[in-house]
Image (spheres, rainbow, N blue to C red):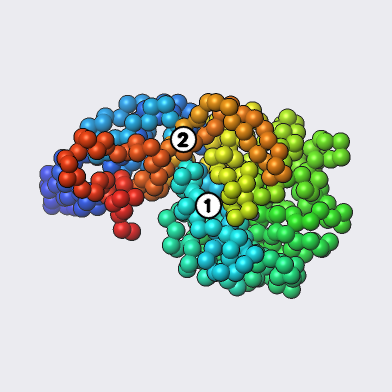
Amino acid sequence: MNRPKDGSSRRDFLAGAAMFTLACSGRSAGEPEYDLLLKGGHLIDPKNSLSAVRDLAVRDGKVAAVGQAIDPGQAFKIVECQGLYVTPGLIDLHVHVFAGTNEQGSYAGDNSLYPDGYTFRSGVTTVVDAGCAGWRNFETFRDTVISRARTRVLALVNIIGQGMRGGAIEQDLADMEAAPTAALAKEHSDVIVGVKTAHYAGPEWDPVEEAVRAGETAGIPVMVDFGSNLPERPIETLLGEKLRPGDIYTHCFSGNRRELLEDGTPNPGLFTGRERGIYFDVGHGGGSFKWSVAAKCLEAGFPPDSISTDLHIGSMNAGMQSQVNTMSKFLALGESLDDVILQSTWNPAREIQREELGHLSVGAIADIAVLRKESGDFGFVDSFGARQDGTEKLVCEMAFKDGLLAWDLNGRTRQDWRQLPFDYGRQGESRWDGILNRRRS
Ligand SMILES: [Zn+2]
C-alpha cells in the first residue's frame, strides 16, 4: 500500500485509497466485495494439500478467498455447490486443436478440433496442443486458433518445421531443426511451453536429440511420442539417457513401445526415467491407452504424472471421450479422487512450468471446475476396444475461466423462470457470467 504524502491528512489518504480501489474494480460504495461465491463444495486443491468442504470467493477473475464460511452477504452471485467437488480448472496436457486449414489427414488440419466445444463441458480450462504446428506454420495456428479460443490454449511446437502434417513430412530429418524451433519458442514464450517430437518411424535418434537441443536453448521441456518401436532406439535408452529431467514421455500406457515386457511386468526403464525426473503422461488418444498396461503399471506402483486426452477426431468418439471420462478410468483402476485431480491440475501445470495455473491459492487465476462424482454401473473402453467396468464416473457440472462462467450443465447458476417476471430479459451479469454476458477483454 502507498503511504500518504507529506501534507495530506490521513482522512484524505483513506478517501483517495477507497476511490482508487473503486476505480480499479468498477465498483460503487457498498457493493459486495466478491463477484462470485461457490458455497459448500468439497474443495480439492492438491498444491495446497486441501481436500475438505470450503467456500471459495472470486473477484476480478482471481481467487479472492477460501474459507470455511464466507459471508454470502459479501458476494454478488452465490452458487450452491453442496455435494459437488470444486477443483482447479483442469489442464489437458495433450490435445490437437490446429483446426481450420482444410488439410485432410493432417493434425495441422482436419484431424484437429477447435477446442471450445470439448473443453469447458469436461472441466478443462487449459489445453496444451501437442505439436500440431512447427516453426514454419505456428503463427497461422496462433492467429487462427490460439488467439480466438475462449479456452486457454498453450502449445508444444513440433521439432518438424512443417508440424504434424502426416506422411513423409513427419519423417523428414532435414526439416527437424533446433535453432529456428527454439527461436520461435522464445518469440512466443507466452504460449509455447515445450517442444514435441512424434510419429518418427526411422532408427535414428535425431528427432529426439534435435528436440532436446531446441528445449535446452529455449529453456522448455520436450514431450516425446516415441513413434515406431525399433530395437535400434529402445525406450530404456530414451528414458535413461536421452531425455532430461523435466521432459515428458506421453502415451505412457500404450504398450506400443515395450512399456510392458514380454512377461507382462512394467519395463524397468519406466522406473529409471521417473527416478531421473522424467514425467509420464497418459495421452489416451485413439491408440495409446491399454487397460492391461495401465493396470499392471498402477499395480506395480507406477501411476501417471498427468492424465491427458490426446483429443483429436480419432479419439473424441472412441473410448477416450473426454477428460473427465479419462479421469474416471483411473478411479476404476483404484486411484483416489484426490490423486486423479492432482494428475489433472497441479502436476500438468508443473510439467509445463506454468505454476500460476492448476491451483486455487488466493490471488491465483480463477479457472475452476465443479465436478460431480456419480455412483452406478459404468463401462469404460480403452483405445483397443476393451472394456473395464467401474462404479464411479466424473461429470462436469460447471466450469469457470478467469472467474467467468463457461459451462453450466444443469443451470445451477440460473433462476427458475417462474420466479422471474413474465417478460424477463437476458439473464446473467458480466461480473460472473461469461456465457450470456461476456465481459469484453
Ligand atoms: Zn497426440
- Which residue does the image show at 17% across and 41% down from the upper left? 422
> Is the residue 157 above or below the residue 314 in the image?
below
Q: Looking at the picture, which amino acid does disc 2 mark?
A: Leu
In primary-sequence order, the first of circles 1 and 2 is 1
Is the C terminus in the top left, top right, bottom left or bottom right quadrant? Answer: bottom left
Q: Is residue 18 left or right of residue 169?
A: left
Q: Looking at the picture, which amino acid does disc 1 mark?
A: Val
Residue 89, how many percent across, how many down? 46, 43
- Can I make out residue 283 in this image? no
**In the depicted view, which residue is nearer to us: 49 or 414?**
414
Residue 355, how many percent across, how many down? 51, 47
Q: Is residue 278 left or right of residue 73?
A: right
- Which residue does the image show at 49% across and 49% down from the upper left? 119
The number of callouts visible is 2
Per the image, label 1 sits on a secondary structure element best described as: strand
Residue 325, how many percent across, how many down? 57, 39
- Which residue does the image show at 63% across and 53% down from the upper left? 314
Residue at mark 2: C-beta within 8 A of ligand 1: no
**In the depicted view, which residue is nearer to us: 157 or 312?**
312
The quarter of the picture where residue 80 lies is: top left
Ligand 1 shows up in the quarter that is: bottom right
Q: Are there few (<14), some (14-19), or many (20+) residues within 10 Å of tag 1?
A: many
Mark drawn on residue 127: 1
Query: Which residue in the structure is indicated by mark 2?
Result: 371
